[in-house]
Image: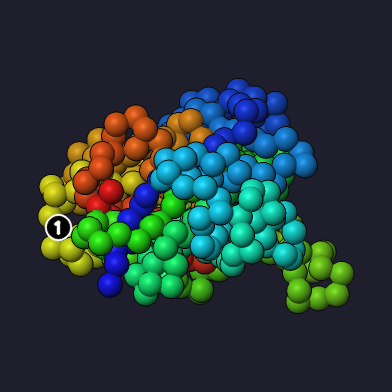
Amino acid sequence: MPFARVAGTGYYVPPRLVTNHDLMRYYDTTEEWIVERSGIHERHFAEPGTGPADLAVSAVEMALADAGLTPAEVDMIVFATLSPEYYFPGSGCLLQRKLPFRNIPALDIRMQCSGFIYGLSIAQMYVQQGMYRHVLVVGAEVQSTSIDFSPEGRTVGVIFGDGAGAAVVSATHEPVGILSTHLYSDGKYAEELTIQEPTSLYPGKVGHLPLGTKPHMNGREVFRHAVTRMTEVAREAMQAQGWQPGDVARFIPHQANKRIAQSVAEQLSLAEDKFYINIQKYGNTTAASIPIALAEAARDGSVQRGDKLVLMAFGSGFTWGSAAVIY
Ligand code: UT7
């Protein structure tokens, strides 16, 4: 059975930089509060009319160049987003028409902040079964268009950003790559982090549900679960491979809040610098956050070929998961 290696990575954020000061135009907030509570200094917002598939194009081109492949060589797209352009069809199909891919399957998944880990797991299975040689896993989000810029929106509004990340997962006979993935969900917390409308529950699609069209997050509850679950699932990935924490070159967590990563590092008795953190530049980019971090870490020297990595995520659903990877 072949192994499924991360053959290339790429990322892209839209040019419009939004600082904490910029957000003070809308919210009763301060630079100090945002930095202290989340670690975020700035994020990027897409221009109106730009969707996740648009942002994904540059990330995918970078990942394919890194892998030495052309779009025509890709066998499948797995596209994770919670902010698709359309109710249907999915962003994967929109990406498929933007580059010279063949008529390959374009599978959209949601899974929110855990979307990229779920996507890696899907890619790993197709590649290891021998069905496909090169699977493109994309996480891309345009969340700025759903942000509630009224005063009530300040807790959620300051943390999210837009961006895209991509990884090419390719068959190899070397014993490297995605070695195991560990996926979970617990739907009893579905309403703790949600945008509920448009909905298929009632005719007209909006104006029916109590939490409505704006993002709703019970921040403290999400934070508490995120620390517990990301710690558990990072341990599980290491145990599955017989790795000690000291064997892992870098942990790449979903960038939800710098304090979440610090708490997970503390729970694992690890120095904080074992965790790759770039939330200060991009905010929380949901499904894009891990592939952006991985691509950036691979370029700035934080992650080298042959390194043992643990990637882990937690988010809306609740969903969570991890991947043990030899990069
Ligand atoms: O992406 C996957 C899932 N998402 C996450 O993992 C996010 C998890 N949660 C968090 O990161 C944090 O809960 C937040 C950063 C969203 C919020 O931080 P917090 O420390 O949990 O703040 P809080 O909601 O408990 O609010 C604390 C105080 C409140 O004031 P009082 O009631 O203590 O007087 C809020 O009204 O901070 C106030 N507050 C703000 N103040 C200034 C809330 N938002 C703001 C703001 N600026 N933007």
Q: Is residue 268 left or right of residue 227?
A: left
Up the image or down, 257 lies above or below 231; here it is above
Q: How many circles with numbers are drawn on the protein?
A: 1
Q: Amino acid at mark 1?
A: Trp
The yes-or-no answer for disc 1 within 8 Å of ligand 1 is no
Residue situated in front as seen by the camera: 193 or 10: 10
Residue 46 in the image: x percent, y percent?
A: 67, 37
Q: Residue at x 62, y 33 (%)?
A: 14
Q: Which residue is mark 1?
A: 243
Residue at left 22%, top 50%?
308
Structural crowding at the residue carrying mark 1, measured as other residues with C-alpha within 10 Å and reported as few (<14), some (14–19) or many (≥20)? some
- In this rendered view, identify the residue nearer to me: 15 or 193: 15
> Residue placed at 69% from the left, 54% from the top?
97
Res 81 → quadrant: bottom right
Is 299 situated left or right of 150 in this image?
left
Residue 76 is situated, as x and y percent measured from the top left of the image, at: 53, 63
Q: Position of residue 62 (x, y in %)?
A: 50, 39
Q: Is residue 254 above or below residue 173?
A: above
Give the side of residue 295 with respect to residue 228, left or right: right
Asked whether residue 311 is in view, the answer is: yes
Quadrant of residue 272 in the image? top left
Q: Quadrant of residue 277?
A: top left
